[in-house]
Image (spheres, grey):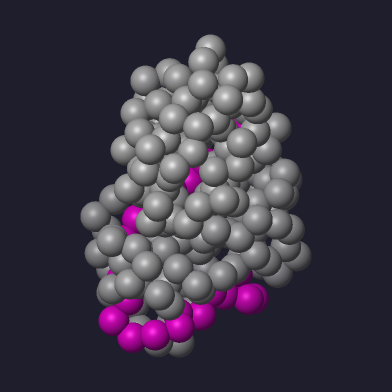
Amino acid sequence: MGLFVDTVSADVTISELGITIPHPTSNYDIGGKFNARAIREATDLTTAITGGDLNWKKTSGGSIEDAADYDPDLALADEANLGTGLIDDRLVSFKDIDDFAETSLGIGAITCGYNGNAANGRFLEFHHGCPSDESPLVVPDNNLYLRRLSLSCTATTNCVVTIFKNMVAIDTVTLTAERSKTKKNINIMLDEDDGLAVQVTSGSARNPILQIWLGA
Protein backbone atom coordinates (compact mmCIF):
# COMPACT_ATOMS: atom_id res chain seq x y z
CA MET A 1 0.00 0.00 0.00
CA GLY A 2 1.23 3.49 -0.83
CA LEU A 3 1.00 6.03 1.98
CA PHE A 4 1.05 9.74 1.14
CA VAL A 5 -0.02 12.48 3.56
CA ASP A 6 -1.05 16.13 3.40
CA THR A 7 -0.87 18.53 6.32
CA VAL A 8 -4.20 20.14 7.27
CA SER A 9 -3.46 23.30 9.26
CA ALA A 10 -0.11 23.07 11.07
CA ASP A 11 3.31 21.39 11.16
CA VAL A 12 3.12 17.75 12.26
CA THR A 13 5.91 15.99 14.18
CA ILE A 14 6.23 12.20 13.99
CA SER A 15 8.68 11.51 16.78
CA GLU A 16 9.10 7.79 16.07
CA LEU A 17 10.18 8.58 12.50
CA GLY A 18 12.31 11.57 13.53
CA ILE A 19 10.56 13.96 11.15
CA THR A 20 8.48 17.13 11.20
CA ILE A 21 6.25 17.68 8.18
CA PRO A 22 5.94 21.45 7.65
CA HIS A 23 2.64 23.04 6.73
CA PRO A 24 1.64 23.31 3.96
CA THR A 25 2.85 19.98 2.53
CA SER A 26 1.04 17.79 0.01
CA ASN A 27 1.78 14.19 -1.02
CA TYR A 28 4.57 13.56 1.51
CA ASP A 29 5.70 10.04 0.66
CA ILE A 30 5.72 8.22 4.01
CA GLY A 31 5.59 4.80 2.34
CA GLY A 32 8.58 5.57 0.14
CA LYS A 33 10.77 6.93 2.95
CA PHE A 34 10.11 4.41 5.74
CA ASN A 35 9.73 0.66 5.94
CA ALA A 36 6.60 -1.22 6.98
CA ARG A 37 7.66 -1.86 10.57
CA ALA A 38 8.56 1.80 11.17
CA ILE A 39 5.19 2.95 9.83
CA ARG A 40 3.28 0.42 11.90
CA GLU A 41 5.09 1.44 15.08
CA ALA A 42 4.75 5.20 14.47
CA THR A 43 1.92 5.95 16.92
CA ASP A 44 2.31 9.70 16.35
CA LEU A 45 1.57 9.10 12.67
CA THR A 46 -1.54 7.06 13.45
CA THR A 47 -2.73 9.71 15.90
CA ALA A 48 -2.13 12.53 13.41
CA ILE A 49 -4.12 10.74 10.69
CA THR A 50 -7.01 9.54 12.82
CA GLY A 51 -7.11 12.86 14.69
CA GLY A 52 -7.38 14.92 11.51
CA ASP A 53 -3.95 16.61 11.55
CA LEU A 54 -2.92 14.72 8.41
CA ASN A 55 -4.96 13.58 5.43
CA TRP A 56 -3.85 10.25 3.96
CA LYS A 57 -3.95 8.82 0.43
CA LYS A 58 -2.95 5.55 -1.18
CA THR A 59 -1.42 7.21 -4.25
CA SER A 60 0.31 10.52 -4.88
CA GLY A 61 -2.32 12.98 -5.96
CA GLY A 62 -5.08 10.44 -5.31
CA SER A 63 -8.29 10.92 -3.39
CA ILE A 64 -8.18 11.52 0.37
CA GLU A 65 -9.14 8.42 2.34
CA ASP A 66 -11.41 8.40 5.39
CA ALA A 67 -9.35 8.85 8.56
CA ALA A 68 -11.31 6.04 10.21
CA ASP A 69 -10.15 3.63 7.49
CA TYR A 70 -6.45 4.12 8.24
CA ASP A 71 -4.91 0.89 9.53
CA PRO A 72 -1.15 0.90 10.17
CA ASP A 73 -1.14 -2.88 9.66
CA LEU A 74 -1.82 -2.20 5.96
CA ALA A 75 1.72 -0.86 5.74
CA LEU A 76 2.73 -4.52 5.88
CA ALA A 77 1.42 -4.96 2.34
CA ASP A 78 3.69 -5.22 -0.67
CA GLU A 79 5.75 -2.03 -0.77
CA ALA A 80 6.17 -2.02 -4.57
CA ASN A 81 5.62 1.37 -6.19
CA LEU A 82 1.88 1.72 -6.76
CA GLY A 83 2.37 4.75 -9.00
CA THR A 84 -0.94 6.15 -10.11
CA GLY A 85 -2.79 3.00 -9.10
CA LEU A 86 -2.72 1.28 -12.48
CA ILE A 87 -2.83 -2.50 -12.42
CA ASP A 88 0.49 -2.43 -14.33
CA ASP A 89 2.15 -0.89 -11.28
CA ARG A 90 0.93 -3.55 -8.87
CA LEU A 91 3.51 -6.22 -9.61
CA VAL A 92 3.62 -9.38 -7.51
CA SER A 93 6.38 -9.36 -4.90
CA PHE A 94 7.17 -11.99 -2.29
CA LYS A 95 9.57 -9.87 -0.26
CA ASP A 96 7.12 -9.32 2.61
CA ILE A 97 6.14 -13.00 2.61
CA ASP A 98 9.70 -14.26 2.45
CA ASP A 99 10.93 -12.12 5.34
CA PHE A 100 8.50 -12.60 8.22
CA ALA A 101 11.06 -11.27 10.70
CA GLU A 102 10.55 -7.81 9.22
CA THR A 103 6.93 -7.60 10.37
CA SER A 104 5.49 -8.23 13.80
CA LEU A 105 2.38 -9.85 12.28
CA GLY A 106 4.35 -12.07 9.90
CA ILE A 107 2.00 -11.34 7.00
CA GLY A 108 2.28 -9.80 3.58
CA ALA A 109 -0.16 -9.00 0.79
CA ILE A 110 -0.20 -9.96 -2.87
CA THR A 111 -2.41 -7.84 -5.13
CA CYS A 112 -4.53 -8.82 -8.11
CA GLY A 113 -7.08 -6.82 -10.05
CA TYR A 114 -8.56 -5.84 -13.39
CA ASN A 115 -8.20 -2.56 -15.26
CA GLY A 116 -11.77 -1.92 -16.41
CA ASN A 117 -15.24 -3.27 -15.75
CA ALA A 118 -14.92 -6.81 -14.37
CA ALA A 119 -18.19 -8.52 -15.21
CA ASN A 120 -19.49 -11.84 -13.89
CA GLY A 121 -17.04 -14.57 -14.92
CA ARG A 122 -14.00 -12.30 -15.25
CA PHE A 123 -10.80 -13.63 -13.67
CA LEU A 124 -8.68 -10.98 -11.99
CA GLU A 125 -4.98 -10.65 -12.83
CA PHE A 126 -1.84 -10.83 -10.69
CA HIS A 127 -0.04 -9.23 -13.63
CA HIS A 128 -1.73 -7.07 -16.26
CA GLY A 129 -3.01 -9.11 -19.19
CA CYS A 130 -2.63 -12.51 -17.48
CA PRO A 131 -5.95 -13.89 -16.11
CA SER A 132 -5.36 -15.77 -12.88
CA ASP A 133 -7.04 -18.97 -14.11
CA GLU A 134 -4.29 -19.14 -16.74
CA SER A 135 -1.48 -17.61 -14.64
CA PRO A 136 -2.30 -18.28 -10.97
CA LEU A 137 -0.36 -17.07 -7.98
CA VAL A 138 1.88 -20.01 -7.02
CA VAL A 139 2.33 -20.35 -3.25
CA PRO A 140 6.10 -20.18 -2.59
CA ASP A 141 6.36 -22.31 0.57
CA ASN A 142 4.62 -24.82 2.82
CA ASN A 143 2.69 -23.89 5.95
CA LEU A 144 1.39 -20.57 4.72
CA TYR A 145 -2.15 -19.44 5.52
CA LEU A 146 -4.66 -17.21 3.83
CA ARG A 147 -5.21 -14.70 6.66
CA ARG A 148 -7.13 -11.74 5.23
CA LEU A 149 -8.81 -10.47 2.08
CA SER A 150 -9.25 -6.79 1.20
CA LEU A 151 -11.39 -5.88 -1.82
CA SER A 152 -11.95 -2.42 -3.28
CA CYS A 153 -13.24 -0.90 -6.53
CA THR A 154 -13.80 2.58 -7.89
CA ALA A 155 -17.59 2.72 -7.49
CA THR A 156 -20.28 1.35 -5.21
CA THR A 157 -21.44 -2.00 -6.53
CA ASN A 158 -22.95 -5.42 -5.80
CA CYS A 159 -20.64 -8.31 -6.54
CA VAL A 160 -19.09 -11.51 -5.26
CA VAL A 161 -15.39 -12.22 -5.74
CA THR A 162 -14.32 -15.84 -5.23
CA ILE A 163 -10.83 -17.09 -4.36
CA PHE A 164 -9.83 -20.48 -5.76
CA LYS A 165 -7.07 -22.87 -4.66
CA ASN A 166 -6.16 -25.18 -7.52
CA MET A 167 -9.44 -24.05 -9.10
CA VAL A 168 -11.53 -25.14 -6.10
CA ALA A 169 -13.39 -22.28 -4.40
CA ILE A 170 -12.11 -21.63 -0.87
CA ASP A 171 -13.55 -18.22 0.12
CA THR A 172 -15.50 -15.20 -1.12
CA VAL A 173 -15.76 -11.47 -0.54
CA THR A 174 -19.18 -9.87 -1.13
CA LEU A 175 -19.88 -6.20 -1.77
CA THR A 176 -23.48 -5.09 -1.24
CA ALA A 177 -23.95 -1.45 -2.22
CA GLU A 178 -20.31 -0.98 -1.16
CA ARG A 179 -16.96 -0.19 -2.76
CA SER A 180 -14.64 -1.90 -0.26
CA LYS A 181 -14.55 -4.65 2.36
CA THR A 182 -11.97 -6.51 4.45
CA LYS A 183 -12.31 -10.06 5.83
CA LYS A 184 -10.02 -11.08 8.71
CA ASN A 185 -9.20 -14.27 10.62
CA ILE A 186 -9.71 -16.55 7.61
CA ASN A 187 -6.83 -18.96 8.34
CA ILE A 188 -7.04 -21.32 5.35
CA MET A 189 -3.89 -23.44 5.06
CA LEU A 190 -1.94 -23.37 1.81
CA ASP A 191 0.85 -25.63 0.59
CA GLU A 192 3.85 -25.05 -1.65
CA ASP A 193 2.89 -24.90 -5.34
CA ASP A 194 -0.82 -24.41 -4.67
CA GLY A 195 -2.21 -22.09 -7.35
CA LEU A 196 -4.50 -19.22 -6.36
CA ALA A 197 -6.96 -17.65 -8.79
CA VAL A 198 -9.61 -14.97 -8.31
CA GLN A 199 -12.87 -14.54 -10.21
CA VAL A 200 -15.89 -12.25 -10.14
CA THR A 201 -18.65 -14.84 -9.71
CA SER A 202 -21.65 -12.53 -9.34
CA GLY A 203 -22.39 -8.95 -10.38
CA SER A 204 -19.60 -6.70 -11.61
CA ALA A 205 -16.95 -4.32 -10.27
CA ARG A 206 -15.18 -1.34 -11.81
CA ASN A 207 -11.37 -1.53 -11.50
CA PRO A 208 -11.46 -4.13 -8.69
CA ILE A 209 -8.36 -4.66 -6.56
CA LEU A 210 -8.05 -7.65 -4.21
CA GLN A 211 -5.26 -7.93 -1.65
CA ILE A 212 -4.60 -11.50 -0.52
CA TRP A 213 -2.86 -11.53 2.84
CA LEU A 214 -0.66 -14.57 3.48
CA GLY A 215 1.11 -15.45 6.71
CA ALA A 216 2.82 -18.26 8.58
The residue depicted at 33 percent of the width and 72 percent of the height is 101
Residue 97: x %, y % from top left: 42, 72
Q: Is residue 17 above or below residue 165?
A: above
Residue 175: x %, y % from top left: 45, 37
Q: Toward the viewer: 153 or 199? A: 153
Q: Toward the viewer: 164 or 3? A: 3
Residue 148 belongs to magenta span: yes
Is residue 37 in view? Answer: yes
For the C terminus, give its image quadrant: bottom left
Is residue 201 in view? Answer: no
Residue 38: x %, y % from top left: 40, 52
The magenta span reads: 132-155
Q: Is residue 137 above or below residue 199?
A: below
Please indicate whether residue 134 sits to the left or right of residue 45 in the image: right
The residue depicted at 50 percent of the width and 52 percent of the height is 34
The residue depicted at 47 percent of the width and 25 percent of the height is 12
The residue depicted at 50 percent of the width and 32 percent of the height is 20
Residue 164 belongs to magenta span: no
Residue 73: x %, y % from top left: 36, 49
Q: Toward the viewer: 108 or 192? A: 108
> Image quarter for residue 87?
bottom right
Please indicate whether residue 49 sits to the left or right of residue 183 in the image: right
Q: Is residue 145 above or below residue 192?
A: above
